[in-house]
Image (cartoon, coloured by chain):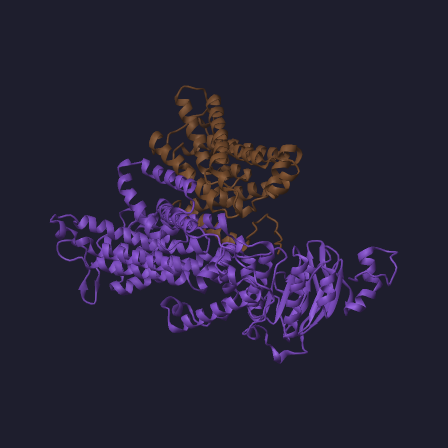
Chain colours: A brown, B purple
């Protein structure tokens, strides 16, 4: 039941980027492709993550930075949507529209816990998720680079004035997010089958979860994500699996109306 | 003026071309426009209607919708279901096909109260996905993947509407008429107080609220109008295709619609028509690409954003204005310039001598920080009341409480003799007669100087939305009057020669003047000025003193937050001194100057009382 909680992992990365779902997809798909090319699993996964990190950085440099100058956020939002569409359709065209299974040793035999069957892979996810959250928190709070990232997120200009190269930090954040996204994609792929279309809805869900949780609160994002994952499973089990996304999205929109700052976010004081 | 005429001529030409298109075959002696080509043009026109609606939302209100295809689909399904299941006539079902998406748009706009930008875009994407999901899974109602087929042929006034080249293609002309109506509505909305308010709300939300614009209301309106256009397009589509299913209205269609807006040039009049034509034609070629088609859209969107972010029309008109306008020297007039007509702005004889504002026990806390602590203050009508104090004393916070931007944690504000409830929004206060300027000027920088002032006059218009779109006489009368008064106010602050310049291009001092003119367009009873002298030269400050004094002498009440001591001495009738959020002195200029607490706050302990602290 808890199995779907992993959807969230990458939303802890806090990057607002519409290509994210597609990078997540790339993580899964590339691993499959690299494996089919004969690489062993760990190598394939590492390769996929590396490519995702690079593409995260490239997307930031080429498609986000030129449009990030204006206060109006329309430009980069559209370019990332454009890139996302391109990645997805290119993958569909080259890799095929159908999903392919990715065999891993952890999927071979289910464990039985109180009657419900769970694969090791599904258990692995929450563990990796928790580890990532702790690691990220530590990174943001303890390291110079992490603090710099928070500073840039808070105020670019001021961060620039104290000697932080805001552009590079942003690029790094995108790269990091790309890596986390691909890792999640790689971990999820064995369960849902790697396919070109696996990214879109998940990307959107992740973003909504992040907003609802209050985008600046990593543990909050993880908790909300887990709760949402469980909730989805319940909807699937007791109502219908067809209505899952519709109900889930509607619910999220309503929550956002009631808690505009997010469930865990702090209210920002507006300066007039 | 010339450009406007050229624009209408171009539109007329386009209308004639489209109207004549079906007859082209007779002219060149071939069976060229077959029913298939006619249908293509009709679908392009339908798209154009939807895109016009989206352009109002994106170009004017600055809100991005990525769920527009769902609203379009909603209109189509409403029309299809009503005529198929409930036996509604064409006209009846079309009314609902417009009304229901418009209502849905209003509901969707509700989040704009709280979220904007990216969040809103995500919510609209989510709406689009929910819509498609419901259509696909609710098979008994919508037919699922097989959709709703065999819709009855529409009839209007007993006439069957068909789209066949050989026999009868009156539906073609019906769509053309709808398109022309949509173009007209776009024009009428853009060049009216509604269009100005939408643009104002997009450029500076705070300033719009301070000028009496209900930002939530105007955004809801923009969303609702654009959804109505989408619904109209959807209804027309359903009756053309006589078949609907969810595949037509997916996220890709939303991206395509948005691409049409951006490609044409968002916020321009001709943009939607140009964008739709270009992209629709391109689509016919891209269709051969199969799975790479979507890739093509993505690529095109990225390329357009890189090469010409203002779109085709925006880029061309930008170039044209650069070629045609020579920079000419513009003379800045003297100010204040009390010309005839200014008495309309200031006259309030009925209120002389009363208390305009009574603040009782105002406390404002941010978390653990108390910005304003138990402030009592009374401002007499027709006086200039200065609020001074060291940095961080809570002056601006108090001003924000008075203008409704902050809700006081405790305390009661009484304005013009009426107690304000805690829920009074800034725009409501503005309509009561409270105008303000901002510490960092908040102009609508992409609008012209005159338009900025006209936004200030927004709440004086009586003509409603229908009157505006239909351009009834009252609209013209009011618009003319507002323009005349706007020009008078610009003359008052010496900016009349800059009327058609973009406000963002003005030098800083002129921006301050414009902000005052804009606030005066509200015809306020109470004017709040937040550090109006900051950044001005000595000469300009002298002029400003004359202006403030003149306004007060003519009956307007002014509350002034300022650091500039000379100025406070020269204009104030009464001074309230704040320190650490509390009132430490209150009285006439002379009384405050002699107050030891004030001296201590400014110079620290040990300074000699009676020293010329605040002297000029």
Residue A137 pos. (x, y %): 62, 36
Give the side of residue A238 with respect to residue B543, left or right. left
- Work out which quarter of the rendered image holds the C terminus of chain A and state it: bottom right
Q: Is residue B43 visible?
A: yes
Q: Nearer the viewer, residue B2 or B253?
A: B2
Q: Nearer the viewer, residue A92 or B575?
A: B575
The residue lying at 63 percent from left, 39 percent from top is A159
The residue lying at 43 percent from left, 71 percent from top is B463
In the rendered image, the residue lying farthest to the bottom is: B350
* Rendered view: A19 above or below A51: below
Give the side of residue B581 with respect to residue B112, left or right. right
Residue B241 pos. (x, y %): 24, 52
Which of the 4 image quarters holds residue B91? bottom left
In the rendered image, the residue lying farthest to the left is: B29
Give the side of residue B339 with respect to residue B268, left or right. right
Q: Nearer the viewer, residue B540 or B484?
A: B540
The residue lying at 51 percent from left, 61 percent from top is B497
Q: Is residue A190 visible?
A: no
How many marks overall? 0
Residue B490 pos. (x, y %): 54, 65
Give the side of residue B91 with respect to residue A227, left or right. left
Residue B263 pos. (x, y %): 37, 46
């Amino acid at each position: 039941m808890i199995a779907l909680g992993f959807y969230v992992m990458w939303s802890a990365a806090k990057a607002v980027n519409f290509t994210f779902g597609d990078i997540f997809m790339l993580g899964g798909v590339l691993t499959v492709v690299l494996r089919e090319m004969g690489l062993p699993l760990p190598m394939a996964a590492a390769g996929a993550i590396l490519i995702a990190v690079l593409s995260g950085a490239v997307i930031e440099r080429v498609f986000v930075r030129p449009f990030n100058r204006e206060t109006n956020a329309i430009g980069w939002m559209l370019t990332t949507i454009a890139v996302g569409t391109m990645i997805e359709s290119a993958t569909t065209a080259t890799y095929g529209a159908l999903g392919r299974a990715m065999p891993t040793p952890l999927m071979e035999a289910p464990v039985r816990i109180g009657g419900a069957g769970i694969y090791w892979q599904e258990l692995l996810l929450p563990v990796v998720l928790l580890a990532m959250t702790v690691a990220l928190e530590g990174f943001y709070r303890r390291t110079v680079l992490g603090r710099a990232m928070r500073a840039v997120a808070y105020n670019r200009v001021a961060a620039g004035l104290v000697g932080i190269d805001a552009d590079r930090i942003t690029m790094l954040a995108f790269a990091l997010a790309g890596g986390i996204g691909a890792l999640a994609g790689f971990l999820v792929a064995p369960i849902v089958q790697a396919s070109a279309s696996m990214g879109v809805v998940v990307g959107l869900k992740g973003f909504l979860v992040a907003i609802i949780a209050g985008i600046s609160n990593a543990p909050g994002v993880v908790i909300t994500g887990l709760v949402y994952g469980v909730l989805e499973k319940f909807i699937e089990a007791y109502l219908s699996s067809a209505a899952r996304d519709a109900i889930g999205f509607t619910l999220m929109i309503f929550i956002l109306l009631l808690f505009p700052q997010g469930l865990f976010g702090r209210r920002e004081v507006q300066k007039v | 003026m010339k450009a406007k005429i050229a624009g209408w001529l171009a539109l007329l030409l386009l209308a004639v071309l489209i109207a004549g298109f079906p007859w082209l075959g007779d002219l060149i002696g071939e069976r060229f426009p077959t029913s298939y080509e006619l249908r293509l043009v009709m679908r392009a026109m339908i798209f154009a209607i939807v895109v016009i609606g989206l352009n109002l939302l994106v170009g004017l209100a600055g809100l991005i919708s990525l769920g527009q295809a769902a609203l379009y689909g909603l209109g189509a399904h409403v029309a299809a279901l009503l005529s198929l299941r409930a036996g509604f006539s064409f006209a009846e079902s079309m009314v609902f096909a417009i009304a229901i998406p418009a209502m849905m748009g209003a509901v969707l706009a509700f989040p704009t109260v709280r979220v904007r930008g990216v969040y809103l875009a995500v919510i609209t994407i989510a709406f689009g996905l929910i819509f498609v999901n419901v259509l696909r899974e609710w098979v008994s109602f919508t037919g699922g993947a097989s959709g709703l087929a065999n819709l009855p042929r529409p009839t209007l006034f007993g006439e069957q509407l068909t789209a066949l080249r050989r026999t009868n293609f009156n539906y073609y002309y019906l769509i053309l008429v709808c398109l022309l109506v949509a173009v007209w509505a776009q024009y009428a909305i853009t060049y009216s107080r509604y269009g100005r308010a939408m643009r104002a709300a997009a450029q500076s939300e705070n300033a719009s609220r301070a000028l009496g614009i209900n930002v939530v209301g105007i955004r809801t309106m923009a969303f609702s109008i654009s959804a109505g256009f989408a619904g109209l397009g959807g209804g027309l589509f359903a009756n053309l295709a006589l078949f609907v299913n969810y595949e037509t209205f997916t996220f890709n269609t939303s991206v395509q619609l948005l691409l049409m807006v951006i490609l044409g040039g968002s916020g321009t009049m001709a943009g939607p028509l140009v964008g739709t034509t270009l992209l629709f034609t391109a689509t016919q070629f891209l269709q051969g690409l199969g799975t790479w088609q979507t890739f093509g859209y993505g690529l095109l969107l990225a390329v357009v954003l890189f090469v010409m972010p203002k779109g085709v029309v925006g880029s061309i008109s930008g170039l044209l204005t650069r070629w045609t306008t020579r920079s000419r020297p513009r003379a800045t007039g003297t100010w204040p310039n009390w010309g005839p007509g200014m008495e309309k702005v200031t006259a309030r004889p009925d209120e002389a001598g009363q208390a305009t504002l009574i603040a009782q026990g105002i406390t404002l806390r941010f978390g653990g920080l108390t910005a304003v602590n138990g402030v009592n203050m009374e401002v007499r009508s027709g006086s200039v009341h200065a609020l001074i104090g060291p940095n961080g004393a809570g002056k601006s916070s108090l001003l924000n409480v008075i203008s409704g931007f902050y809700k006081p944690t405790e305390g009661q504000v009484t304005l013009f003799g009426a107690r304000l409830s805690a829920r009074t929004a800034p725009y409501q206060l503005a309509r009561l007669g409270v105008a303000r300027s901002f510490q960092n000027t908040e102009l609508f920088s992409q609008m012209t100087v005159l338009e900025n002032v006209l936004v200030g006059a927004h709440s004086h218009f009586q003509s409603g939305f229908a009157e505006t779109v239909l351009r009834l006489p009252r609209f013209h009368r009011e618009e003319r009057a507002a323009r005349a008064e706007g020009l008078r106010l610009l003359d008052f602050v010496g900016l009349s020669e800059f009327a058609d310049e973009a406000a963002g291009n003005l030098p800083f001092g002129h921006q301050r003047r414009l902000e005052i003119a804009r606030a005066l367009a509200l015809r306020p009873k109470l004017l709040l000025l937040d550090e109006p002298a900051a950044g001005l030269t000595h000469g300009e400050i002298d002029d400003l003193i004359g202006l403030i004094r003149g306004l007060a002498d003519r009956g307007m009440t002014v509350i002034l937050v300022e650091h500039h001591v000379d100025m406070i001495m020269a204009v104030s009738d009464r001074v309230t001194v704040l320190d650490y959020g509390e009132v430490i002195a209150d009285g006439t200029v002379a009384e405050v100057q002699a107050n030891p607490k004030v001296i201590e706050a400014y110079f620290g302990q040990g300074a000699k009382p009676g020293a010329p602290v605040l002297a000029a």
